[in-house]
Amino acid sequence: MKKYLNSKRSIKTYQSKLMNDSLEKELETNYKKKGSLRTFNYNNALVCPLKKSSRNNSLTLLGGVYDSEGSFISHSLTRRVSPPNIKMFFDDWFGSSLEEDYSNINKLDKKVIFLGALPKHYGHFITEGISRLWYLSQTNDQDTEFVYISEDGPDRFLEIFEIFGIDLSRTHKIEEPTEFSEVVIPEASIRLHDYYHDDYEVTISSILNSVPSSSAEKIYLSKKQRFNGRALGERSIERVFKRNGFKILYPESIPLINFFSILKSAKVLASSSGSSAHNAIFLDKSAQFICLNRSRHHHPLQIMIDEMRELNVVYIEACMNIFRGDFSGGPYNLFPTRYLASFFADSNFKSFSIFDLVHSFFSTVFYIFYTIFLGKFVNYLLKIKNSILK
């Protein structure tokens, strides 16, 4: 075990030297954005919906806001930059769309606040999707309506806006190009792999202040859908936590307001890395978070979250990925590593049973089979589907 201490929190690690070196780089990186966030006001601005378009022989998402001169407003984009300490390439989620043929444009004489592009992925919604809500904490405007763009289909996490205090009757998805007499665009308070601002943390605190407390103590976040092409082997690890007093939660089956209430009151949260781990943003400050890394990386966004909430964190290398991957791709093979066994021993946990170890062995076999054969076949089918949609 290795310890990192400062005046507000502690960090413990059970992991290889490679992982510790990676963590130290992340901890030395200044992700906090200083200064005040800005707002941008535009008269007679055009808001274009988020639509799929064929560009350069590939499907691309286009959308955003344009000023009265027809110039794209870059502040309306959801920027995604590459991590500073990991060799991975990320591009913006979508791009400008004015090249599309918009023959009919709605014109409305009203002021609106642009909330950005709302992801349908939960982990992105609780970060990028609420990144502009800080503006509402600094204004007493009770009448202005809100607009957003998103991909086709229902938007699943709008309940978070309601918990924050937004009446959804004032919130509208832009599905046709619409010109407004005034559009207010708040700067994003968090950007993946790049920065976070105190105002994002204020937004999270506002959400938590709106939900009741619960009697939660020790929580383990799991998934009802055991395998989605991303991670295997979690069941045996989950059973150990359950034997040691952790309540197993499946977030997708819990109303968000109840879920946030449980997280707000939890003293200890355990989860594999990724979107589940990003829920640590809803923990009370000084709570303990046990992060089971599913790959040999430290996710920059997770480092930001743990720092923002001043969490006492334990990072554990809990994977045996035979095939090289990154922190967002997979598939991953969660495994009873010696690092995980050391954590259980130091914590006086009842550790793995023979049954758990046998299960981990067969999960590893399936992980190899999926990576070499089944996964490639699934990807081939997806390519055929995308070529048909072009």
Image (cartoon, helix red, strand yellow):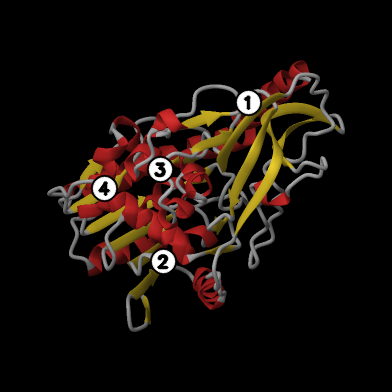
Quick one: SS at disc 4?
A: loop
> Which kind of residue does numbered mark 1 sit on?
Val
Number of the front mark, 1 or 2: 2
The residue tagged 3 is 142
> Which kind of residue does numbered mark 3 sit on?
Gln
| Disc 2 from disc 3: Cα separation | 29 Å
Residue at x 51% of width, y 39% of height: 230
| Disc 4 from disc 1: Cα separation | 42 Å
Quick one: SS at disc 1?
A: helix
Quick one: SS at disc 3?
A: loop
The mark that comes first in sequence, 2 or 4, is 4
The residue tagged 4 is 210
Local packing at callout 3 (Cα closer than 10 Å; few below 14, some 14-19, many 20+) is few
The residue tagged 2 is 308
Q: Residue 346: where, in percent of width, then height? A: 24, 69
Q: Residue 345: where, in percent of width, then height? A: 24, 66
Q: Residue 350: where, in percent of width, then height? A: 18, 56
The answer to whether 99 appears left or right of 105 in the picture is right
Instruction: Give the answer, above or below, for where 99 lies relative to 2.
Output: above
| Disc 1 from disc 2: Cα separation | 38 Å
The residue tagged 1 is 378
Quick one: SS at disc 2?
A: helix
Number of the front mark, 2 or 3: 3
Number of the front mark, 2 or 4: 4
